[in-house]
Amino acid sequence: MKYPNFTKEHKSLMAKYLSKEVFEELKDLKTPNGFTLERAIKSGVDNPDSGIGVYAGDIESYTVFGALLDPIIEEYHGFLKSDIHKSNLNPDDLNAPNLDLKNEYIVSTRIRVGRNLADFPLGPAISKEQRDEVEKIVSSALNSLEGSLEGRYFPLLGMSEEDRLSLVQDHFLFKAGDRFLESAGLNRNWPNGRGIYHNNEKTFLVWINEEDELRIISMQKGGDIKEVFSRLAQAIKELEKMMKFAFSKHLGYITSCPTNLGTAMRASVHIALPKLAKDMEKFKAITDKYHLQIRGVHGEHSQSEGGIYDISNKRRLGVTEVQCVQDMYDGVKALIEYEKALCD
Ligand code: ADP
Ligand code: ILO
């Protein structure tokens, strides 16, 4: 493998930290699952507009390719090699009374975590047989859930195009054909092994074998952030009784993208901020202050529609789950106050 031909367009943290020296040190290394530097960086090399540009194939990638990944993790999360991750999923520790009782601003709330099974490689390095096995283990565990989490697993294989598109359009299901995931090897054997579980109300959902082996999601209309968090915490507890997730003391929950390490949590609202949206500089200043990220209404790499934005926590590692949600809550509170104060 030769040193990549980075252009001025390559803006990712991978391109920033993959110096010729680091490349020489890592280029011939392999993890126990046979994952290489070439595969780890392919997404960022193929897609110059990547922000991060690197994926892990297994938990060991984070140590074997540490010379590249440590500085990326440090810059993205502000988290040092000597730091220890902490977890707190207790909803009682969250201070989040409903911010929008009249439903004027918050359209919906969603909180998700990524998880991967401890005994399998991550998606970029998994074989078809292993992926199918993950689907079997996770879907049968989910199918045994009871009460408000009870639901059904819908594999992508055999799903009609109409049903798939409507689940995507309604924000329940992941999109197909993401070019970042494609280059990372995460779309291999599509649609085999992929699918979605949801309860009847579609307030508790699990994606199987997308970017991570599980994306555990709690969502509902409106702005009751605490209720959404409580449901997620309960679901995680139930699933932990039935499977062991990849976890390290240092990095918390292990995910294929370094941005998701730690809590692997993204807590978001879809929120209407039409006035603030006319002053993007101010909007960005507030979101930066509260450690928030702005996305479009159809997820990452999409645009806003009708002045509605997806606002979520940016920090995920070195902060607890409660803090992730609190970041989002505090920032959304400030955004609503600014929006209210602006004249038409
Ligand atoms: P992820 O959050 O899983 O990293 P995306 O940003 O691609 O991935 O979002 C996945 C889907 O979840 C998209 O369809 C997006 O519109 C939807 N979504 C995210 N936040 C919310 C929300 N607060 N309410 C409704 N749908 C949401
Ligand atoms: N690989 C993409 C996405 C990075 C962060 N988002 C997700 C979904 N992991 C990039 O480098 O921009």
Image (tube, grey):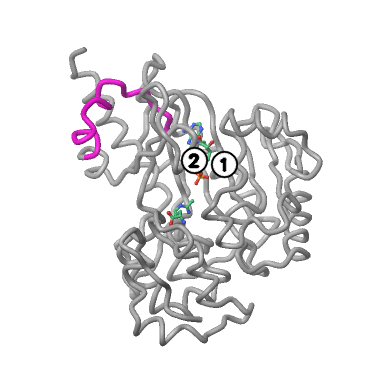
* Chain-order first, disc 2 or disc 1: 2
What residue sits 21% from the left and 12% below the top? 344
**In the rendered image, the vertical position of residue 15 relative to residue 199, given as above or below:** below
| Residue holding disc 1 | 217
| Residue holding disc 2 | 111
Q: Is disc 1 placed on a helix, strand or loop?
A: strand
Q: Identity of the amino acid at label 2?
A: Ile
Residue sitting nearer the eye, 196 or 324: 196
Crowding at mark 1 (Cα within 10 Å: few <14, some 14-19, many 20+):
many
Residue 208 magenta-highlighted: no
Q: In this picture, which residue range is highlighted in magenta?
A: 269-284
Disc 2 from disc 1: Cα separation: 6 Å
What residue sits 50% from the left and 62% below the top? 43
Q: Is disc 2 placed on a helix, strand or loop?
A: strand
Q: Identity of the amino acid at label 1?
A: Ile
Query: Would you say residue 77 is visible in this rendering?
Result: no
Left/right of residue 314 with respect to residue 217 in the rendered view? left
Location of residue 250 in the rendering, given as x and y in whole percent from the top left corner:
43, 70
Cβ of disc 1 within 8 Å of ligand 1? Answer: yes
**In the rendered image, the vertical position of residue 64 relative to residue 90, given as above or below:** below
Disc 2 vs disc 1: Cβ atoms closer than 8 Å? yes
Location of residue 275 in the rendering, given as x and y in whole percent from the top left corner:
25, 21
Q: Which mark is residue 317?
A: none
What residue sits 28% from the left and 25% below the top? 336
Location of residue 75 in the rendering, given as x and y in whole percent from the top left corner:
30, 63
What residue sits 46% from the left and 78% below the top? 65
Residue 277 magenta-highlighted: yes
**In the rendered image, the vertical position of residue 248 relative to residue 301, given as above or below:** below
